[in-house]
Image: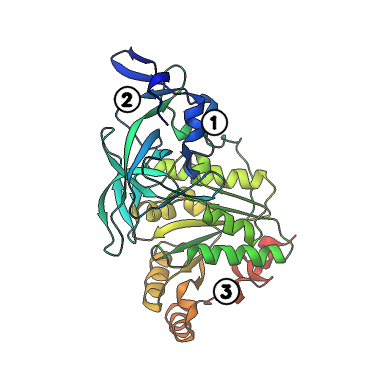
């Protein structure tokens, strides 16, 4: 569709501003990361700005490569076509199995670096991937006064300080694809089968909805992720901001009535945001038990040692390695901890085993 005839151009403090019609907004494919941003506020385009993480941008798809679909706010995957206009958020990305990417300094051609809707410039990629899908930013999305809209404005509100909260189990791992989300989901399933009201959250990572849907499908009564706290990704956020995200999500789950909470912390222990959060005062204060997910016994042993050295309450091992009985035996011997496969994670007594019966008694 051609919009030139309905466009009004203007100058405001030296910045080029274009009117953004409701029709154009509705025609664009809005991504999962933008689901909390109210479309009624999207009324202007800033054409010559310097973007920052969380800024909303209207972009045009110019070459389809790795990401051939975009996740819509309701998590339906919509196929992309050359020339499609999409609404996504700028953000940095850390994904050793996919892309490393940085927010560019200008509205230059960049990439769709995550199907959940993250715009950035790829600086390195895994050799198994296709090149990133190319997009051309058209302009930053602004309100009627020309103020750029950022996801930070649409996050969950800060709740009053709570003196008590439910017990929290954290799931961490060696790296991407170690089995953290699956481990969290089966923990949730076991606890919900026991009649407990379970809250779940993904504290760090790159915006996408499938992990939250898995947590809900597993039985979580309420589930959030960092996008609900107003960020598209957590890579390169200040340490204090990530701590605030953890606190905010836990507070909202407690407010929603969760009796026990499962938190997934993305990526691996060597990832700066993960290691910093785990060893921060907030992380130590929040986590009552930790389950460590790994792909093999050596990774499990190294990770458990890392957690123990920092006096974190690691209680069990799980993850991809549990597909192999031999790896289970090796990990149990090296770690001196229970190694929980999917069946064990789903047991109704799992919360008692990880936290101690007195911590979770109804």
Distance of label 1 from label 3 (alpha carbons) = 39 Å
Q: Are marks 3 and 2 in contact (CB under 8 Å)?
A: no
Residue under label 2: 47
Label 3: which secondary element: helix
**Residue 130 in the image: x percent, y percent?**
30, 58
Residue 63 appears left or right of 281: left
Label 3 or label 2, whichever lies nearer to me, is 2
Residue under label 3: 342
N-terminal of the pair, mark 1 or mark 3, is 1
Sort mark 2 into few (<14), some (14-19) or many (20+) by Cα contacts within 10 Å.
some
Out of 149 and 223, give the one closest to the viewer. Answer: 149
Image quarter of the C terminus: bottom right
Q: Which circle marks residue 38 in the picture?
A: 1
Sort mark 3 into few (<14), some (14-19) or many (20+) by Cα contacts within 10 Å.
some
Distance of label 1 from label 2 (alpha carbons) = 21 Å
**Residue 78 in the image: x percent, y percent?**
49, 49
Distance of label 3 from label 2 (alpha carbons) = 51 Å
């Amino acid at each position: 569709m051609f919009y030139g005839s309905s466009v009004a151009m203007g100058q405001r403090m030296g910045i080029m501003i274009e009117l953004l019609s409701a029709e154009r907004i509705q025609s664009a494919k809005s991504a999962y990361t933008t689901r909390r941003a109210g479309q009624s506020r999207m009324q202007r385009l800033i054409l010559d700005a310097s973007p920052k993480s969380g800024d909303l941008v209207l972009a045009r798809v110019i070459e389809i490569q790795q990401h051939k679909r975009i996740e819509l706010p309701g998590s339906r995957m919509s196929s992309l076509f050359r020339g499609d206009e999409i609404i996504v958020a700028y953000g940095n990305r850390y994904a050793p199995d996919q892309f490393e990417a940085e927010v560019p300094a200008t509205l230059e051609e960049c990439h769709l670096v995550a199907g959940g809707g993250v715009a950035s410039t790829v600086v390195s990629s895994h050799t198994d991937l296709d090149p990133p899908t190319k997009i051309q930013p058209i302009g930053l999305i602004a309100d009627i006064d020309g103020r750029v809209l950022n996801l930070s404005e649409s996050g969950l509100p800060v709740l009053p300080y709570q003196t008590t909260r439910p017990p929290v189990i954290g799931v961490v791992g060696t790296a991407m694809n170690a089995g953290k989300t699956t481990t969290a989901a089966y923990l949730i399933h076991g606890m919900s089968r026991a009649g407990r009201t379970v809250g779940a959250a993904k504290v760090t990572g790159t915006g996408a909805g499938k992990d939250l849907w898995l947590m809900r499908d597993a039985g979580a009564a309420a589930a959030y992720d960092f996008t609900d706290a107003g960020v598209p990704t957590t890579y390169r956020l200040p340490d204090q901001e990530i701590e605030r995200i953890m606190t905010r999500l836990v507070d909202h789950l407690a407010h929603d009535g969760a009796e026990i909470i499962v938190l997934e912390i993305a990526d691996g222990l060597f990832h700066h945001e993960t290691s910093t959060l785990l060893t921060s005062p907030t992380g130590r204060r929040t986590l009552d038990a930790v389950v460590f997910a790994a792909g093999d016994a050596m990774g499990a042993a190294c990770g458990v040692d890392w957690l123990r050295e920092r006096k974190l309450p690691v209680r069990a091992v799980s993850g991809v390695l549990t597909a192999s009985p031999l790896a289970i035996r090796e990990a149990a011997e090296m770690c001196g901890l229970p190694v929980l496969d999917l069946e064990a994670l789903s047991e109704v007594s799992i919360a008692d085993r990880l936290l101690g019966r007195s911590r979770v008694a109804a």
